[in-house]
Image: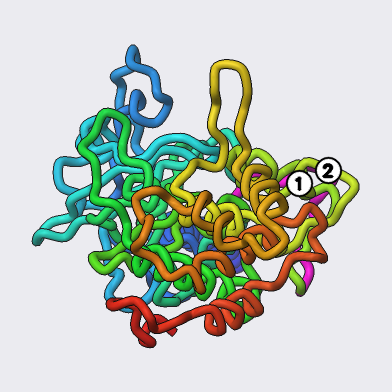
Amino acid sequence: SVSAMVAICAALSIVLGVVVIALLNVSARRRRGVGGGSADGLFQGKELELESSVVSGSSTKSSKLAATGKMVTFGPGSSLRTEDFVGGADALLSKATEIGRGGAFGTTYRASVGEGRVVAVKKLSTASVVESRDEFDREARVLGKARHPNLMPLKGYYWTPQLQLLVTDYAPHGSLEARLHGKDGGAAFPALTWAERFRVVAGTARGLAYLHQSFRPPVIHYNLKPSNILLDSRCNPLIADFGLARLLRKPKQQQQQPDGNGDVGAMGSCRFMQSAAMGYAAPELACSSLRVNEKCDVYGFGVLVLELVTGRRAVEYGEDDVAVLTDQVRVALEQGGGGDDDAAAERLVDPALRGEFPEEEALPVLKLGVVCTSQIPSNRPSMAEVVQILQVIRAPSLPGCTAQLF
């Protein structure tokens, strides 16, 4: 009958509609899984198959874990695919390729990606990183926009719930830590000249000033130290690991974002204390009642300045005591007062530089380091002011110290 035919056609239409909707949903899920909702089309490459022992750190597991994430790259010339990594996951995250370990963020590896290109890959400590892919992507994209001659830019990332990797350029000339203090058990490096040390101080100041004042939103490093200052062939500094604290999991009590001035609020200080290295951490990071802003980076910069001028470590452990560099320099300058500042500077400057540095620069730079490490954040200059102060200090008296530094 006609009514029966109508009923059958209606039923078939409903079934067909359900099937079409289901297929559309499946297609949408696949697109989201592959592209991560990226409007820029930056997700490239195939799935990266990893040994579970690499992901978990366990040496007993051997079953393979298929990671469903993909590589996201930032900026021009940063195209990178997961299949570009030579040797696969085992070669990528092996002890043989490890170039840096420690701190709150994880381990860094040297990776070959074909055609002679080498990159640095940081495997983040999953336990402390934000769990949401969307939040991780949002924060990583902010950091990926930072471009400055004295920054080591973030070129991309790889994300799965079990594994997070950050990709940057590889710095073949090593870190300031290695050049200034040498590697444990490694070959000694030639002593840095005063021109090279001043170049590191000036370049680091410019890079931080860019992060604090020019970049939007402002970025605070929180973990400035010699191992995070990489050097090029001319000892120009490249600040690495900047802003990684943004990727840390926020405590429930502090879910708000930093304000326009970079402040993270009182509750945020405890969160970022874990990322700061001993001897470089500003005192306010240990106080939950104080707001934290970019002045904590100024403190770390001041310690770095004192370390460069004196050649001493920020904290040195003896058999019976602990020597803190900021205290040593402050006391020495106070005792050298009354017109004997030059003698104080002579005692404090790295012995490798005796007679080969301009005194009219060494003492002001030392005093700048002391001012930057003031216990009171408001007494520290901004990094933009530091750049201006260094321009005034700069004296063209030593061969090799040229005006091109500024």
Residue under the point 69% across and 46% down: 331
Question: Which amino acid, mark 1?
Answer: Pro
Residue 200 at x, y percent in the picture: 42, 65
Does 31 sit above or below residue 324?
below
In percent of width and height, residue 157 lies at 41, 56
Residue at 63 percent of width and 66 percent of height: 368
Residue 19 can be seen in this image: no
Image-based side of 204 in relation to 330, left or right: left
Marking on residue 287: 2
Element assignment for label 2: loop
Q: Which mark is residue 283?
A: 1
- Residue 57 falls in image quadrant: top left
Magenta span includes 253: yes
Asked whether the residues under the numbered discs 2 and 1 touch, taking CB atoms below 8 Å apart as contact, a structural biologist would say yes
Image quarter hosting the N terminus = bottom right
> Which numbered disc covers residue 66?
none
Residue 52 lies, in percent from the top left, at 35, 26
